[in-house]
Amino acid sequence: MKKSALFIISLIIISAGYAQTDNKNVVKIFPTSFLFGKATLGYERVLNDNSSFTLNIGLPSGISPSKYVSFEETEWLNLIDGKLDGFLLMPGYRFNFSKKGAPLGFYIEPYLKYEEFSTSWQAEFIDDENERFLSSFDGSYSGLGVGIQMGFLFLIGDVVSIEWSFFGLEAKTPNAEIKYTDLSGGADIDDVYVEIAENFSSDIPVIGDKIEFEKGSNYVKGIASDFILPGFRSAISIGIAF
C-alpha cells in the first residue's frame, strides 16, 4: 500500500513538473525556517524558458529561541530567556532544465548569501560551589558566502508551488563573537574564562578551535574570523505562482 502511494505521488510530481504554465512569478515561504527562529520568504522571477532570478529574505520570527530550542542547564551555565535579531539575503540565478520552461522542473542554482544575526540571553553562571551569579550571554554572527544548489519545483492547479532544494553546498567567511558579562559583580572572571574557553573550543565543530578569548574585569569575550566555513543546504518551500 505504501509503495503504491509513493508511486502515485511520484507520478503526480513528475506530471506536474512537465505541465505547461504561463506564470512568471512565484512568491514562497519556507516553513522549516521557523524551526531555526526565523521566517524566510522567497521570490522567483522567470526571465526566459531556461532561467530565473531568485531572492530569499530571512527575518527573525519574533519567537524567543527558548520556545523552539531546548537549552539544558549545564554545570556552569543556565540560559533563562533570550531573543534573536538579524536578517538573511540570498539572491540566485537559476538554470532550469524542464522541457516546459521555468519555473517548472529540475534546476541548478548558484547563489550568494549574506546573513547577520545576534542573540542576547539572561543567564546565570554556576560556580564549583553551585552558587549562581546573574549574567548576560550575548552572541553575534555575520557571514558572506557563495553556494550552489539543485532542486525541483512543481505546481498544483497551476497556482500552488511546491519546491524541494534537496542538495546544496556553500562556503562562507564568517565573523562570530560571544560575550559573557557578570551582572552580579560577584562571579570569579578567571573561573568563567576557563569554563567558556574549554567548553566552546571543544563543543563547537569547525569554528571552536578558531575562537580567540579575552577577559576584562567583568566579562569574557570570544572572537572568530578570517576563515572559511563550509555548509550544506536543503530546503522546502510552499508558494503561490502568478
Image (cartoon, helix red, strand yellow):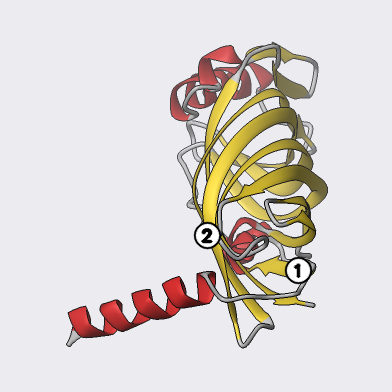
100 vs 42, left or right, is left
Query: Which label sits on residue 152?
Result: 2
Q: Amino acid at mark 1?
A: Val
For residue 114, which quarter of the picture?
Answer: top right
Residue at image point 62% right, 75% down: 20
Residue 146 drawn above or below residue 158:
above
- Mark on residue 26? 1
Vertical position of residue 125 compared to residue 151: above or below = above
Of the two numbered discs 2 and 1 on the same chain, state the one appearing first in sequence: 1
Label for residue 201? none
Q: Position of residue 98 (x, y in %)?
A: 56, 59
Report whether 233 appears left or right of 53: left
At x 79%, y 65%, the residue is: 62
Residue lying at 49% horizontally and 35% vertically, measured from the top left: 129
Q: Is residue 21 above or below residue 48?
A: below
**Residue 95 point in image, percent of width and height:** 64, 46
Instruction: State the SS at label 2.
Output: strand
